[in-house]
Image: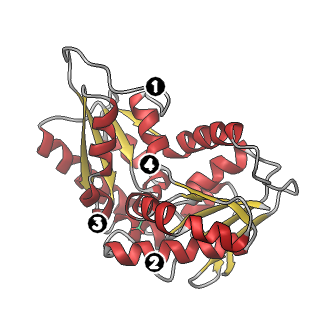
Amino acid sequence: MAIGVFDSGVGGLTVHRKLVDRFPQADFVYLADQAHAPYGGLGGEEIVDLTRTGCRRLFEAGADVVVLACNTASAIALRRLQQTWLPEYRREVGRALNVLGIIVPTIEAATGRGWDQGPPLDGKIEKLEVLGVFCTAATAMSQVYEIEVQKRREDLAAFSEPCPGLAGLIELGAPVEELKVVVGDHVDALRRRIGRYPDKAILGCTHYEIVAPLFEAALPEGTTLIHQPSATADALERYFGRHGEYDLGTAGRREFLTTGTPGRQSDLVSQFWGAPVTFEAA
Ligand code: DGL
């Protein structure tokens, strides 16, 4: 059995990398839905259908737990799949299975408030902090970051900044100089919209983590960057601590699948992964 990791493309490898480092003995299957990427501009129903198909493929490949290492899928599809598909699918296959997202772990890291820490603290707000969230258009439209942050911290205001096109450029392995200009424009757009730089920032699309140094360079030193891959690895470790029912395998199997064109991924991907990554046909 294995841990499945799903993304529309190569972005989820940022999360996958941290999970592999955290659970080195476990078996992993990664699925990139490159045939349908990018997800950021698709409609809600399409994202739900594609995510369900991706999860099913990962469960068929032996995953017990699938991590949606895609903010867009987590924002749009996770709740729907957990409520309307998973219970029946579990009965069908007759084993413990689950699908987990990456947004709540990220928000817990950004707010310092986990699921077991009760309702937001009441009281006078001494200072309002601003959290900038760079993400796809679909994630920004869902307002998931604004809603989930508000539930936990009234003194933290989240603003999502859609960056349409950026994930696609990263997926295609665009030159760093081109990406630097696009990232700089989005950071500037957020600064102009909220009147100042954010105190904290989330790269709310896994693809952006691949170019995290460009965001770091465009943001002032005082802005703290919340990293989703480590927040997700922390949350998954806590989850497995509470759920001993999953068999994660012990052979250290690493399988990389794509619905798109199989083959070696871009140099940008190899750089952050630390080795060339080659996808096989899903
Ligand atoms: N990397 C995905 C995310 O975290 C989706 C990017 C896309 O396919 O548009 O949102």
Give residue 123's position: percent from left, percent from top. Answer: 23, 15
Q: Nearer the viewer, mark 3 or mark 2?
A: 2
Who is closer to the viewer here, 102 or 230? 102
For label 4, the residue is: 103
Q: Nearer the viewer, mark 2 or mark 4?
A: 2
Give residue 95's position: percent from left, percent from top. Answer: 74, 63
Cβ–Cβ under 8 Å for marks 1 and 2:
no
The three-letter code of the residue at mark 1 reads: Gln
Say what secondary structure mark 1 lies in: loop
Say what secondary structure mark 4 lies in: helix
Q: Residues within 10 Å of mark 2 (few under 14, many from 20)?
A: few
Q: Nearer the viewer, mark 4 or mark 1?
A: 1
Q: Which mark is residue 164?
A: 3
Image height of 112 relative to 20, above or below: above
The residue drawn where x is 45% and y is 77% is: 49
For label 2, the residue is: 49
- Quadrant of residue 177 in the image? bottom left
Cβ–Cβ under 8 Å for marks 3 and 4:
no
Who is closer to the viewer here, 257 or 84? 84
Say what secondary structure mark 2 lies in: helix
Q: Nearer the viewer, mark 1 or mark 3?
A: 1
The three-letter code of the residue at mark 2 reads: Asp
Give the alpha-carbon distance from disc 2 to disc 4, as whole Å.
Answer: 19 Å
